[in-house]
Amino acid sequence: MADGSEFSLRWRSSRHARRLLTLGLAGLFIATVARRPEFAGLAAPALLLLAAGRSQRRPPQVRLQARLSTRRAFEGELVAIDVAAEGQDGCSVRWTLHPGREIEPAGATDADGPQARFTFSPQRWGRRQVGTVDVVLRDRWRLAEGHLTVELPALDCYPAPAQQRTQVVLSRLPNRLGEHAARTFGEGIEFAGVREYVPGDRQRSINWAASTRRGRLQVNTFAAERSQDVVLLVDGTSDVGEPGSSAVDLALRGAAAAARAYLDARDRVGVITYHWGAVGWLVPGLGRRQVYRIIDSMLASERGGAGSSGAGYGMSVRRLPRAALPPGALVVVFSPLLDQRFVETLRDMRERGFTMLVIDVLNAEPPARSGSTNRMARRIWRMEQEAIRFSLRELGVPVVHWDGIGSLDLPLAPYSRRPLMTAGSRR
Amino acid sequence: MTRPIAIRAAAILLGAGCVVWAAAPPVPKGLANLALVLAGCGVAGGALRLILGGVPVPRDTFLLPAPVRAWLWFLETLRRVPWEEGAVIAIAWLEVLHSSRPRHTAILGAALIAYLLATHLAESGATVTSLRPQVRVLAAGAGLLALGAGAGMLPAAGPGAGSALLRLVAAAALIAAAGLVLPYVAPSAGDDGAGQGGRWGSTERRG
């Protein structure tokens, strides 16, 4: 509807016209029955207004336009929609917005005039219908109303990224220029140590204080700066918890935050979304736009389709191409760990040598009911969950819990302070 | 007092005035008391609708407590019932219960038209200037109202001669003639100056 479409109107008498008609008919009726001509005079102004109002122009169709200020928005972000009517033939226009699901109006939902602007904010990620707008055209004397209901365009709502500033860095980084200080010497800026001068060393790297103490020329050495491949593995199987803070909500928000943090550190970031054994993926890439590609890919997987180019859908984790899951990549998993097959997949990946970090996004429990059996079942469920997390930790997979409210830096702090040991370096 | 409040107050006072004007002096016949009660209820309901018209109604009322749901039901009833139509019929009924008093009826007719126009302005949020294109038609209507009152004041030609019917036919003929002439007298839709907010930023919003 952005370029304008013609819509037919349903015209009917306004409330004002119905009142005038009531007065006119009542006056005429009384004048006839009671034979009192003054009541005909009483009816005359109302009937004259109605008769004269018939000459007002009432267009059978009107051209409407609706334009969103943006096609994509994050949760809670303010979005505006501009609506405009053309060809209303001098009639006044009134707009009434009826917001769709998970759409919260941020201002008035009624407006007058041929053009109007409504502001709203989508409350939850996904493809959201903005809603419908009722258009009422009134002729100049407001004796007739033309009604029309139009569906507004849809909006892609992205999950609001959580806060994450720090990154978890692998102890063994691929030989690619980046921003993380590696354990090998190189041409970075982070001081790594002092060694004896050898011919070919740069004169400006000589450490004169150390040279004076030792009596021989010493040079400073620096850590190499490398980047890493990061793959975000998002489990969308079990959407438990309250809408808005469910496991999938938290997983998407956490993954969006992680993608932003690692891409800011010049890492290559990709995503794999897991749904009941099938996966969708986006190969790791660089740059600011990759954040949006990743979120698009996650949302497309939620809808059960493939994302943009470089993405795929439908294969199992075991048969993922190397491009989607590069060897030596850091795999950051967002999952409530409720699906046994997904837990088995994690174990399998660990055995294949991937370095993983699991962020547990489970924030719900079975409802508390009275009765010893219910209490026992709840306790067993908790023990099972503990056992799953314990078994992953035993395999060398760190599991941290994130409540979805605070920053992701807090649960990741033990692993972001020092490099995370890669699977190969532990053996 | 802001303009919308003044228009609302005018509508309410005009409605109350019409009821009093039509009821005075009280007549003990033809269910006059019932008509008076109905007229009062109609005007009071219309007044409440104008006063509470801006109260927002939540979209989802399913989980609201019973008192709030009762309040919302009351608001919905206020908005749906045609209070003014009922009041107009009851007021006309009250007036017809009195013996013929054409001048009194003509004033009542003018007050009723003013009441309906004020109610329309109050609920639509329009200003009084929006009635400017209708001034000529209203003037013609006022003339017909005066003619009707004049016809009512004419002495009867004689008992049983159908003089009242003759007067009625004359009044109806006047109305019909005016209706035929009106399309030429009334301003066309394009030539009046009642402009609308056609630019960005001129859109008027109400909460």
Image: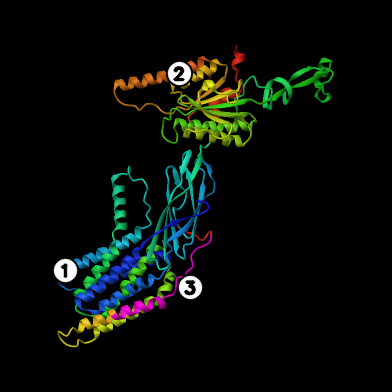
Query: Distance between the Cα atoms at labels 1 and 3?
Result: 49 Å
For numbered disc 3, what is the local secondary structure?
loop
Q: Is residue B175 highlighted in magenta?
A: yes
The front one of A84 and B203 is: A84
Residue type for callout 3: Asp
Image: magenta residue range: B173-199
Residue type for callout 1: Leu
Query: Distance between the Cα atoms at labels 1 and 2?
Result: 83 Å
Q: Residues within 10 Å of mark 3 (few under 14, many from 20)?
A: few
**Which label sits on residue B191?**
3
Q: Is residue A94 highlighted in magenta?
A: no
Q: Is label 3 or label 2 in front?
A: 3
- Seen at 31% across and 78% down, the residue is B175
For numbered disc 2, what is the local secondary structure?
helix
Quarter of the image where the C terminus of chain A is located: top right
Q: Position of residue A419 (x, y in %)?
A: 62, 21
Q: Are marks 1 and 2 in contact (CB under 8 Å)?
A: no
Q: Is residue B18 left or right of residue B122?
A: left
Query: Distance between the Cα atoms at labels 3 and 2?
Result: 80 Å
